[in-house]
Image: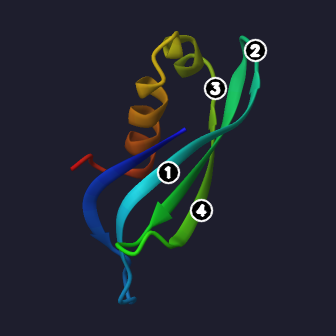
Amino acid sequence: MSLVQIVPVEIPQSPIIETAVRVIVLNVDLGVSANIEAQLLNSEGSIVQVQSLVLAQPSYSEWGLDDNFVVNWTLTQLGLTKQ
């Protein structure tokens, strides 16, 4: 769906720093929910962590036609900030 640069986040007790997140809508149950995969990437673009999220009601109803809603919702759920 989209790749978003984030304020770098250091993984505790690890030399890895996450610098971007790729948000992918895996599937949608129309009118009900969507399964989201968030791939957290390091500065080289390698996946260092994958998070699975469910966009359920009432948030799902807010999605509408703007896919940026899904990106912003995902960042909020993961406690990340766009850079």
Q: Residue at x 54, y 58 (%)?
A: 39
Q: Residue at x 51, y 16 (%)?
A: 63
Task: Identify the mark nearer the N-term, 3 or 1.
Answer: 1
Quadrant location, the N terminus: top right
Callout 4: helix, strand or loop? strand
Q: Note whether 33 is above or below 12 in the view shown.
A: above
Residue 16 point in image, percent of width and height: 38, 82
Task: Identify the mark nearer the N-term, 3 or 2.
Answer: 2
Q: Which residue is mark 4?
A: 50
Mark 2 and mark 1 in contact (Cβ < 8 Å)? Answer: no
Q: Residues within 10 Å of mark 2 (few under 14, many from 20)?
A: few
Q: Note whether 64 is above or below 50 in the view shown.
A: above
Q: Which residue is mark 1?
A: 22
Mark 2 and mark 3 in contact (Cβ < 8 Å)? Answer: no
Rounded to the nearest angstrom, the CA distance separating label 3 from label 2 is 11 Å
Q: Which residue is mark 2?
A: 30
Rounded to the nearest angstrom, the CA distance separating label 3 from label 4 is 19 Å
Rounded to the nearest angstrom, the CA distance separating label 3 from label 1 is 20 Å
Query: Mark 1 or mark 4: which is in front?
Result: 1
Rounded to the nearest angstrom, the CA distance separating label 1 from label 2 is 22 Å
Query: Mark 3 or mark 2: which is in front?
Result: 2
Rounded to the nearest angstrom, the CA distance separating label 2 from label 4 is 24 Å
Callout 3: helix, strand or loop? loop
Viewer-closest of 66 and 29: 66
Query: Mark 1 or mark 2: which is in front?
Result: 1
Q: Residues within 10 Å of mark 4 (few under 14, many from 20)?
A: few
Task: Identify the mark nearer the N-term, 1 or 2.
Answer: 1
Q: Which residue is mark 3?
A: 56
- Determine the image quadrant of residue 30: top right
Residue type, mark 4 in image: Val
